[in-house]
Image: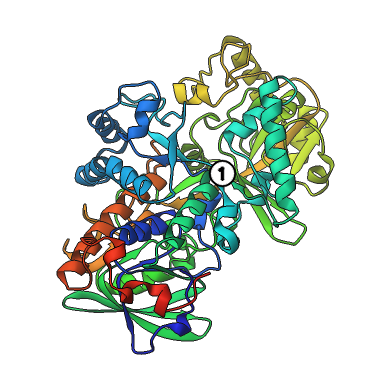
Amino acid sequence: MLLDLGKLSPEGEAFDVVVVGAGGAGMSAALYAAIDGTRVLLVEHSEYVGGTTAYSGGTTWIPGTHHASSVPGNDTLDTAEAFLTRAVGERTPAALRRAFLDNGAKAVARIEANSDVKYRACPTHPDYLTELEGSTMRGRALEPVPFDGRLLGPLFSLVRPPIPEFTVLKGMMVDRIDIFHLLRVTQSFASFGHCVKILLRHVSDRLRYPRGTRLVMGNALIGRLLLSLSRRKNASLLLNTSVEAIRHDEAGVTALTLVQNGTRRTVRVKGGVIFASGGFNRHPALRKALLPGADEAWCPGAPGHTGKLHELTRPLGAHYGEGALSNAFWAPVSRRQRKDGSWAVFPHFVFDRAKPGMITVNQAGRRFLNESTSYHLFGVAMQEAHKTSPSIPAYLIADAEAMRKYGMGMVRPGGRGLAPFLADGYLTCADTIEELAAKLGVDAAGLKDSVVCNNAYAKTGVDPDFGRGSTAYQRHNGDASWNGPNPNLGSIERAPFYAVRLYPGDIGAATGFVTDTDARVLDTRGAPIPGLYAVGNDMHSIMGGVYAAPGITLGPGLVFGYIAARHAVQRASAEGGGDGGLQSEACRPSRHMGVATHGVRV
């Protein structure tokens, strides 16, 4: 599977399908093409596979799959379509959203039946816009089944490690189920047993591996994709490899020039090239144009989405979509410098800001948003508010009880071990609200008034300012054990008081190349560029910059990876470049078994 570019023929080898970018969407597209029996090359410019998917929760939003029957509900594709129409409206073509819905169940069934990729439905994982008709509380959000990384053997080191601050005990990954049990370890025998089991596994792992091999969330998905690709002799992977040039003629894209460690090779393409490079976010010029005012230092994504591939694609006629709510998807993040000098960027998804006993204020000490809204709308609201009143950074405020119960960002629940966070300034602490305001440099009267109002709202359960806790999604992210009238609202009254600075961090591109329902990149005339496809964050999001539900990047990434691979495979067959999957892998001629003649399998 793993290739050295220097082992390829200098004259130019031919592949049926080439996928550029080994994140979740790219690896899925490559696997679909490999399942169809064609010769596939997956190109990744970093030393890891996984991209930002490896950092993520791995949630994959696809309505109508066979997994939906495992949870209560009577969802239909028409219901899901109506929900998306209300959420997205005319920001993207309805035909693209329908293509996603019509192919979702097929994509999941095909990859599960022919690989080690396995999903399960989350018992409760609501759409983010539950106020809209057609939303659901469960059934559409899938998550990867935890994976034993030891099955990868030496390939385990190729999986991009998770954000260290999202792990415990120096490299043990935990998901929402684990966190539930860890917080209740002394309260039930079931939780105690679960915790003992995963802790013993981690201790065993650390005797042989640099981190835990029990992979969950996005790491589990990437591990499963990598194992599946490694078991396909017709799939090859190039790491530390960049695309230098795209060759095309009147028939479309014909070849790519690749560079790896100073070695340059041209590979011919028969069926098509699928771009899944992660989007534009770390391209300086594109970032300045599309995300003005958002510092790259606030971005928690993996380093791979440099946008360099976009520079090569636009001369072919490719262009970006327009009309999105935002050019990126967002989350509030906090930052802290690690001992090695690097910076940890921590997304505040659900574990703190939505909980009772916490508020978020601007530099005038005033609340300016609904703290329990989705992380995307939170990030959008920060930027909008900053246009009229300084709101970046904003300040997440909590009292001692909230800190103990929920933690704050990188600070774990329990209220212990605070000294390092206080020493480096990540966490600010004071005995009074006025003192906290002074330390933060915010208006003391404004902050005190915000706390007084919050405490009054906590008693009534109603937030007249921003409607906090007014939807099923928001209440789901509150504290189910809370004894007040609103699980998102609690008094801030017990000293000491704490604060963490928040910034709007872009977690992925929403704006990308315009495509058709086959994921073919369209030129400025609206015609497909033959042999060129875009999926994942390289594709203009079918959600139009609206974060309607969990997993609305990985879900379309998987489905349009399936669609693009299917079309490219058919094109390869029509061009005489392969059998289009009509033969079984065992019947394919040996010249397609890339590892036998074109590199070293690890």
Q: Quadrant of residue 278?
A: bottom left
Q: Residue at x 56, y 38 (%)?
A: 349
Image-based side of 595 in relation to 514, left or right: right
Q: Nearer the viewer, residue 105 or 522?
A: 105
Q: Is residue 554 visible?
A: yes
Measured along the vertical axis of the image, is residue 345 above or below residue 140?
Answer: below
Percent from the top left, x then y, of residue 12? 33, 85
Image-based side of 245 in relation to 411, left or right: left
Q: Is residue 550 visible?
A: no
Q: Residue at x 44, y 54 (%)?
A: 24
Judging by the rendered image, the residue that carries numbered circle 1 is: 216
Q: Residue at x 48, y 86 (%)?
A: 263
Mark 1 lies on a secondary structure that is loop
Image-based side of 473 in relation to 196, left or right: left
**Which amino acid type is marked by label 1?**
Val
Q: How is the image coloured?
A: rainbow
Q: Quadrant of residue 26?
A: bottom left
Percent from the top left, x then y, of residue 475? 51, 21
Percent from the top left, x then y, of residue 325? 36, 44
Measured along the vertical axis of the image, is residue 253 above or below residue 384?
Answer: below
Measured along the vertical axis of the image, is residue 294 above or below residue 414?
Answer: below
